[in-house]
Image (cartoon, grey):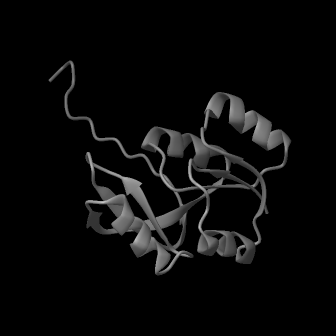
Amino acid sequence: MKAVVVSRHALLGAQQRALAELGAEVVETTAQYDPDADNPRWKAQGIDAVFTIALPPALLARLCEAFRVFTFDMESVGMTESEDAARAWCAEAPEVRSYLPAREGSHRLLEFRGVSELRVQIQTTRVWSVNG
């Protein structure tokens, strides 16, 4: 399947392996997603799927209308107060570990767990009406 990866970060080795084993031919990697510009362009290129880590629900809904959408499941496993400690932790399993800056001076430790296919279903419940 022809795929796009939407991520601001370099893929971990295990994420690259997952893409290969899922048969994803990555033809583009981008840090941003603009549904009005990207959806028609990607459709014209024959893109079948989009892989991402985290996008706002409204953007995920727009993606799911047009493509199969997969997420890289990243589990937050803790925090550390120094970047050196975060790097040392990642070095123990660089294929699956990463970190992101969190609060001032702290770093969120993340482990890649797998890939999930996303389906968005929007349900509405009227909670107020003009006529009571």
Furthest residue toward left:
132
- Image quarter hosting the C terminus: top left
Residue at the spot x=28%, y=41% of the render? 125
User: At which x and y percent is residue 60?
Assistant: 52, 46
Question: On screen, 11 above or below 45?
Answer: below
Furthest residue toward bottom:
92
Question: On screen, 11 above or below 128?
Answer: below
- As rendered, which of 28 and 46 lies closer to the eye? 28
Residue at the spot x=26%, y=48% of the render? 103
Is 25 positioned to the left or the right of 49 in the image? right
- As rendered, which of 82 and 48 lies closer to the eye? 82
Question: On screen, 58 above or below 77?
Answer: above
- As rendered, which of 76 and 122 lies closer to the eye? 76
Is 82 positioned to the left or the right of 4 in the image? left
Furthest residue toward top:
130
Furthest residue toward front:
84
- As rendered, which of 1 and 7 lies closer to the eye? 7
User: At which x and y percent is residue 47?
Assistant: 78, 50
Is 92 positioned to the left or the right of 52 in the image? left
Quadrant of res 68: bottom right
User: At which x and y percent is residue 82?
Assistant: 30, 60
Is 110 positioned to the left or the right of 68 in the image? left
User: At which x and y percent is residue 23?
Assistant: 77, 71
Question: On screen, 63 above or below 131?
Answer: below
Quadrant of res 43: top right
